[in-house]
Amino acid sequence: MTTSRRNLDQVVAAIAERKPSLELGPVDICFLIALHVRTEGANLTSLTEQQLEDVFAHASSVVQPEADQVRRRATHAIQRLRGQRLLARVDGQGVVRTGEFALSRLGRAIVEFYLEEDVLTRASLALLTTSLRAAIADVLATARTAETLETWRDAVVGPLEVTIAELIAGIERRQRGLDLQQEDFQAEIRRLLEADWFGALDRCQELLESTSATLHELNEVLLRDSSVLLTQLQDVEELAFAAGNGEAEAAARRLMDQIDRSVAWGSARQRAWSEYFQYVHRYLRDVVRLDPTRALTQRLRDQLANVGATFALAYAAAPPIRILRTVAPVRDKPPVARPRQPREQEPVTEPAIDPQALLDEKVHRSLAGGAPTLSIVTAEVTTELPDAERFVEAGRVAGTVARLARVASAPERAWVAVAGALEIEEWRVDGERGSRP
């Protein structure tokens, strides 16, 4: 299991232990939005329970004007939102008095999703990337002169994790806003084609071309500025590595991953919208323009509605292309085969060979030839053996010579080199046993 998989399992397990759950109806969402608008309009940091009930009553009168028992429903709504951590009590008085409440970060995020329309444009992206370049340049200049741990933490790690991370998060938030806008464009194109078949051509083409141009411009800006931003962050990472500051190094690496993700978003969205652009244009060209009054479409629907109708497909057979060259037939290659051999061999009777008898015969011939020393006998007997076997055979030769011949040695035995790297103690041979010297 990889490290990323383990981290993912730990995060999911930790969230699952908290048993999160969100159940919001239209009244709850409108209540949250009304709370945000009320606090922003009156510059309030918190609201009392009475104010919460008043805001709920106002939102309920708009969404469900026929509903009754508003106060009771407001109490349940406040408890429900507090249980889901969308409202937080901020007064710190416990049960001594009625509390004061404010939207939590989760509640504010839900409200911002429905209210704010941050869409990534060329102007906003250029402004954000310019601010990013300036902020990273300041951090890089500080990292080059930082000498203490406090300087790294306050002037490098802090801006990386807060200021620069928020700017990149702003780009990602606007990218998600543009995704929602593209989805709305697709829904609008579908509604236009359903409402006005032939008259919606110009509006559909306008939406397609404007969105394609916007994505193309955004992708160009991302590709152009991302290389500069990544280079600056890599310099910060190298300086942090040289200084041994792992916290700054990890922060720079996380920001580089965020920038890579934003660049990948631009390429993926441009590719996806290009496919959708081609699909819609092909539909407009092949279906809408060929059937402006929907006559063919209506006839097709009528035929499909007739269950008892039978359908057939007629097609024209095209003649094969005439080949003007002579085609040589491909010869079949014979299969690769080899003659079969019997798996079992017939047993053959061979005479047994006694290695010691052969050695005795070789030593006897050497002694009979007048070899005066053990080294000469050993050299003559082992001359045809490889070096790896000569050492073992030399011991056997010495034993055989001592058995077949009369040998003598000086008090100080000299070591004599035999063929190759083999050396043995020298003996003098006075003749074979059973013969006179």
Image (cartoon, helix red, strand yellow):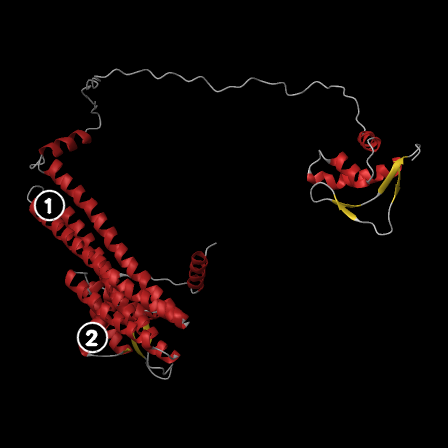
The answer to which image quadrant residue 230 occupies is bottom left
Name the residue beneath numbered marker 1: 195
Q: Residues within 10 Å of mark 1 (few under 14, many from 20)?
A: few
Of callouts 1 and 2, the N-terminal one = 2
Residue 343 is situated, as x and y percent measured from the top left of the image, at: 64, 21
Q: Residue at x 76, y 35 (%)?
A: 380
Determine whether 135 is above or below 332 in the image: below
Name the residue beneath numbered marker 2: 40
Decide which of 47, 221 is in the foreground and name it: 221
Residue 164 is situated, as x and y percent measured from the top left of the image, at: 28, 69
Determine whether 279 is above or below 60 in the image: above
Residue 64 seen: no
Residue 361 seen: yes
Q: Residue at x 28, y 63 (%)?
A: 231
Label 2 is placed on what type of residue? Glu
Give the left or right position of residue 187, taking residue 83 as reference: left
Q: Residues within 10 Å of mark 2 (few under 14, many from 20)?
A: few
The disc label shown at residue 406, or none: none
Give the left or right position of residue 192, taking residue 58 as reference: left
Decide which of 271, 192 is in the foreground and name it: 271
Residue 206 is situated, as x and y percent measured from the top left of the image, at: 9, 50
Decide which of 321, 71 is in the foreground and name it: 321
Q: Residue at x 84, y 52 (%)?
A: 412
Q: Residue at x 33, y 61 (%)?
A: 257
The reply to whether the C-beta atoms of the residues labelled 1 and 2 are less than 8 Å apart is: no
The answer to which image quadrant residue 225 occupies is bottom left
**What SS does tag 2 mark?**
helix
Label 1 is placed on what type of residue? Ala
Determine whether 75 is above or below 368 in the image: below
Distance between the Cα atoms at labels 1 and 2?
40 Å
